[in-house]
Structure formats: C-alpha cells, structure tokens
Image (tube, rainbow, N blue to C red):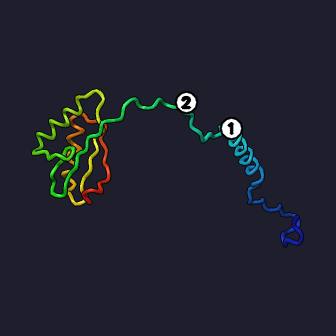
C-alpha cells in the first residue's frame, strides 16, 4: 500500500525488489526433516563373542626364567652371570625351541643404559621368544 508516495497519479508503481524467502525456508525445513528421518539409528555397542563359563585351571605352574641386567651391563640368567652375547643367544635359543616356552622375566636395573636392555629384548624377539616381559626389580634398586 502506497499512501502519499509523492508520485504522479498516473505513474506505474515501482516493482518490489525483495525476494520472498518464506517458500525457500519451507523447502529447506522439509529437506532437513527428510534427512533426519532417513539417517540410520547409530548403535554405539560392539557385538563380541565372549567365552562362556570359567576356563580350566592351568595343569602346571609356568616355568619362569629371570634375566637380570645389572647397572654395569652384566647379564645374569637365573642369578648366574652370562659371560657374553653368544652364551645369552644360546640360552634364548633353547627357550625359543621349547614347545611350551617358559616365561622370561627381564629385570633391568634403573641405572643401566637402555641400549643393553633393548639389546636383550631384540635378541629374544629375533630368536622367537614369545613370553617375555619387563618386571620391576626391587633387589637392584
């Protein structure tokens, strides 16, 4: 409605320059609702086949081999000094050759250089020892 626009009585009214946004908003809302309806329900659970019952107790106690690494790099196999790397490899080969491997507990001193401990672990892995773990060593600390 133009009242008192000041234009001449016989002149055509100016065209409206704004775009009607209502239909566009309606279409966008419908599309959003359709998208929300078609999104599959998210399930945050993972289906796992868990064992049923209690496992049988172990028939025998595991054999434990203790490898101590002293602060100066001396390697002890069950409290007996291993003279060189070849003797250590021979003992680890013997462990790796067994069908039921004993557990190897590696107990490094906190003052020993890391390369000595890493060398023992790398040798054990290279020779096929599968049951090896680092154990805290209160005796040498």
| Element on which disc 2 rests | loop
Residue 22, label in figure = none
Q: Position of residue 86 (x, y in %)?
A: 11, 40
Instruction: Report whether 27 appears left or right of 103.
Output: right
Position of 85 with respect to 133 (left or right) is left
Q: Give the CA distance from mark 2 to mark 1.
A: 41 Å
> Which residue is depicted at the point 84% across and 73% down?
6
In the image, residue 124 lies at what x, y percent?
Answer: 22, 39
The quadrant holding residue 83 is top left
Name the residue rendered at 55%, 30% in the picture. Answer: 53
**Residue at image location 40% in from the left, 29% down from the top:** 59
Which residue matches tag 2?
A: 53
Q: For residue 121, which quarter of the picture?
A: top left
Q: Which residue is mark 1?
A: 38
For residue 102, above or below residue 78 = above
The quadrant in which residue 45 appears is top right
- Identify which residue is drawn at 28% across, 26% down: 99
């Amino acid at each position: 409605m133009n009242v008192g626009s000041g234009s001449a009585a016989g002149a055509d009214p100016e065209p409206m320059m704004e775009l009607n946004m209502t239909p566009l908003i309606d279409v966008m809302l419908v599309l959003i609702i359709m998208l929300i309806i078609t999104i599959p329900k998210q399930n945050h659970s993972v289906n796992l086949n868990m064992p049923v019952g209690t496992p049988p107790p172990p028939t025998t106690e595991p054999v434990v081999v203790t490898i101590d690494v002293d602060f100066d790099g001396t390697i002890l196999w069950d409290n007996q000094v291993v003279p060189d790397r070849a003797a250590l490899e021979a003992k680890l080969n013997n462990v790796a050759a067994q069908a039921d491997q004993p557990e190897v507990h590696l107990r490094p001193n906190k003052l020993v250089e890391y390369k000595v401990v890493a060398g023992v672990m790398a040798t054990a892995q290279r020779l096929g020892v599968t049951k090896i773990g680092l154990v805290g060593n209160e005796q040498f600390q």
